[in-house]
Image (cartoon, coloured by chain):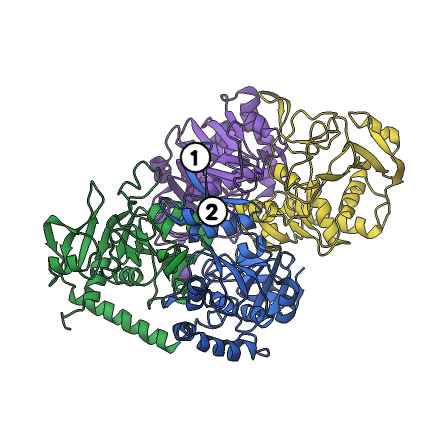
Chain colours: A blue, B purple, C yellow, D green
Amino acid sequence: MADFLSLHDAVARYVEDGATVAMEGFTHLIPFAAGHEVIRQGKRDLTLIRMTPDLVYDQLIGAGCAKKVIFSWGGNPGVGSLHRLRDAVEKGWPHKVEILEHSHAAMACAFEAGAAGLPLAVLRGYVGSELPNVNDQIKFIECPFTGERLAAVPSVRPDVSIVHAQKADRAGNVLVEGIIGVQKEAVLAAKHSIVTVEEIVDDLTAEPDYHPNACIIPGWAISAVAVAEKGAYPSYTHGYYPRDNRFYKEWDAIARDRDAFRQWLDENVHQQVANPAGGKA
Amino acid sequence: MADFLSLHDAVARYVEDGATVAMEGFTHLIPFAAGHEVIRQGKRDLTLIRMTPDLVYDQLIGAGCAKKVIFSWGGNPGVGSLHRLRDAVEKGWPHKVEILEHSHAAMACAFEAGAAGLPLAVLRGYVGSELPNVNDQIKFIECPFTGERLAAVPSVRPDVSIVHAQKADRAGNVLVEGIIGVQKEAVLAAKHSIVTVEEIVDDLTAEPDYHPNACIIPGWAISAVAVAEKGAYPSYTHGYYPRDNRFYKEWDAIARDRDAFRQWLDENVHQQVANPAGGKA
Amino acid sequence: MSREYTSSEMMTVTAARALENGMTCFVGIGLPSEAANLARLTHAPDVVLIYESGTLQTKPDVLPLSIGDGELCDSALTTVSVPEMFRYWLQGGKVSVGFLGTAQIDRYANLNTTLIGDYHDPKVRLPGGGGAPEIATNAGEVFITLKHSKRAFVKDVDFITTLGFGRDGKGRDGVPNIGRGPTRVITDLCVMKPDPETKELVVVSLHPGVSREDVIDATGWEIRFADTLEATPEPGARELEVLRDLKARTDRKHAGE
Amino acid sequence: MSREYTSSEMMTVTAARALENGMTCFVGIGLPSEAANLARLTHAPDVVLIYESGTLQTKPDVLPLSIGDGELCDSALTTVSVPEMFRYWLQGGKVSVGFLGTAQIDRYANLNTTLIGDYHDPKVRLPGGGGAPEIATNAGEVFITLKHSKRAFVKDVDFITTLGFGRDGKGRDGVPNIGRGPTRVITDLCVMKPDPETKELVVVSLHPGVSREDVIDATGWEIRFADTLEATPEPGARELEVLRDLKARTDRKHAGE
């Protein structure tokens, strides 16, 4: 069963320097609080996997935690670039970061295959794209029944996956609701997993909005559950608080400038031990 | 968008002699009413796909509709054999039926791959089993990343899939709830699909128990919706009526005897045009 | 409360005791389901029961007749699609033990649920593989329970539906990402385990009142016995009471439906 | 209500008109999303909008800033996982049209959203592929909309993130199970379609007040014009009203958040 830990202890226990880490949440439920805790603990040389790096990885990259980033769409949604990611890739600041890029379809399938315990995912993908020229992890196989050429990518099997969700119950079972992304797949594909939640309830199956086919991850499939109120802010938690689209726009100016970024990081992450969610809650 | 048809018209339009048909529903929501309509319309030479043939295919086979059955577990759950299936396979009555058998894992993956538009499913399956000796559709591929030998089976892509569900709304969107089996996969994998439902409601998203991640199949992904009250009887519809376990037990005696079966079929299917659900409703 | 019990009850109680609290068990219908639920209702309240119908962590009040009875969904933590069940939960390595029944079993614990006789001219068609082929290879280990008889316990199964240790006992050697396979077989006469070297099934424990001859007579090969043969402990009073209540509830429910 | 309008509005209205009622549209964020929702709110009320975040048949009241805004889920028929979205709905052949934006496009309608310059020493890193590579090949056809400029319309893209018709126009020839690819490109100046034979983009319609020279000046290759060049119809009063209301609602919503 999942251990109930503080966010500090969960990150300290499961995120090791050099680890392969997937923090997932597709626009919704991005585990910012956990990401900030990783920054505060000064983790280094992480291989960071995320379909959409978003601000959370921009912050981790700018803070110097990343050795490599595996992703499929690295922008600030609806706003523009991730300037910390670009600064690392284009200028090597704060140090050079290696990137490995996929398409969304391939990464989604790779998470699915990881959850399914398979070494590879097979998809009708990358036809005519030049991504296979620059990503040696993309191969092609031939269907033994039809002869069709299909793409194959290695499954995603992180050392630790971190996701945020609405609530857990006392047995550590977790409800994910709304845009569920690849959260379940990330948790099931990983050796260890940390789930931050908005709140703990007694029993998910006794909740008034219980649904027999809701996306519930059993506690015995999770390593640690940590409460982090507003833990997805400035992204959002369906049913709790909305996405702070304004902050996403403001991030553009903060992240463009190294000093502005350092100052933001200092004020909103390093000095915020008591408020692990960071940002303007 | 799905057409709203009578069950008679839906079967007449989409189930052709010689077609490959998947009637799915994993113990729950088995489309008996539709199966009986197929029998009444005297369809012939069907290739019938179902993970668990269950009574519905026992009846179709006994009624002479089947040329071939593709399945992974052909028993009367908790009771014993499917005697009509056995009589066809062992004695050729009413005529010889060809069988192609898989494991559940392989068929589930084959439905998933069919829904995903792929020609094959890849799984860690059939290790040490002799099923590949008798099913030439089971092949093995080598993972290009790890060298692991994995099983491959062709995806399921029926001409028509038929499933039963709780309710549809006026746009033809369908809610499947409870044990959802491979219903969604069956519908999405097929060229055409018929969904029978217990009732029609105005708008699924306005129902009091609406849930954002419920298993809803959009109307534009379905060919025809037909109302069939108690259409899954003697299996069951979660939220509507329970499984008639007693009938499942009684079926053993009916199906053991060719004459008893013919009489049952005559009384409960052929003479039941007005009550398409058949059985003892 | 009488301590008298039937051989079936002895089998079920012994099978139930094999499950430890906290195990994640992929449950076959019939005898395995009876044993797994008895375990849950007695010494292993936190055993996680998973049925292939997609019902995760289910706690049925009565035994299901089928693998997909409504009771399983109603009492589950959540219910997932069947592809997800086989892909994420079984193949994904989340199942510590698969609990299976079978029609035939041989000395290397291979299981046959496909047919008796020749495949293309069967004497008896059995239901087929169902979930078993992949449960047996993707679960951490496998428990098997069935009644002991010469028809069921054969030297070589007519057909290997589901791998035990193969025709020669070496079927799992060198195979990557495979579970340990059958670790015990519980019958109404005894408990068997595979020999650590040869993988041949060996009787390790005799149920009360059962002799070696009883087992020899009910087994279709020259069955071996462990050097230190144990006596299976008798069912406890509470185990029998809970089992009988469970079966009575089940009978009432299914008769009433 | 004024019939004056901006070139951006002209582009959005023209892009919206490309969508027919009943189409199933996989929507890219930004301009495609604006056009697709305008279509839904005007001539195509039953157009089905799908966003890669898993939101099926969504009807947002305001335009989403991101591909996964809560508004998309709140107004959807249902929301599925991202793997399911890409596997069952896109790759499964349920999408009739993919509606994409891009940073660079070339004469064969190949799209580059990866980078400017050399891959290993980029001048500008762009966000990357996202959903586009498989939307462009698995959807029945593809509409592309972006502002016309020499920076965006280049003879050969620096990197083919997403297939149009390949470096030689033959990239889809003989490929099984592939969509028709880009069938029209809608800019703020004109509408282009691929030549049926060579697949090179050809201007088929000029927006009101736009000259051939305007297009030539904003295109990085020797752009061809169709023999019978059409005049794109002006936006209608209702289209402009609905579009402006939508954008005003959107601005109010995002500023307030």
Residue A22 visible within the image: yes
Where's residue C19, x and y in %?
75, 48
**Distance Cα–Cα, label 1 vs label 2:** 41 Å
Where's residue B275, x and y in %?
43, 41
Q: Amino acid at mark 2?
A: Asp
Where's residue A106, x and y in %?
45, 49
Q: Amino acid at mark 1?
A: Val
Which residue appears at 43% of the width and 71% of the height?
Answer: A243
Residue D88 visible within the image: no
Secondary structure, mark 2, is loop
On the rendered structure, is B218 left or right of B28? left
User: Which of the chains bears the disc numbered 2?
Assistant: A
Please tell me the numbered disc located at residue A136: 2
Give the farthest residue toward the left. Answer: D228
Quadrant position of the N terminus of chain D in the picture = bottom left
User: Which of the chains bears the disc numbered 1?
Assistant: B
Quadrant position of the C terminus of chain D in the picture = bottom left
Please tell me the numbered disc located at residue B21: 1
Which residue appears at 86% of the width and 47% of the height?
Answer: C3
Secondary structure, mark 1, is strand
In which quadrant of the rendered view does residue B44 lie?
Answer: top left
Does the CB distance between marks 1 and 2 fall below 8 Å?
no
Do the residues marked 1 and 2 share a common chain? no
Crowding at dot 1, Cα within 10 Å, few <14 / some 14-19 / many 20+, comes out as: many
- Of badges 1 and 2, the one in the foreground is 2
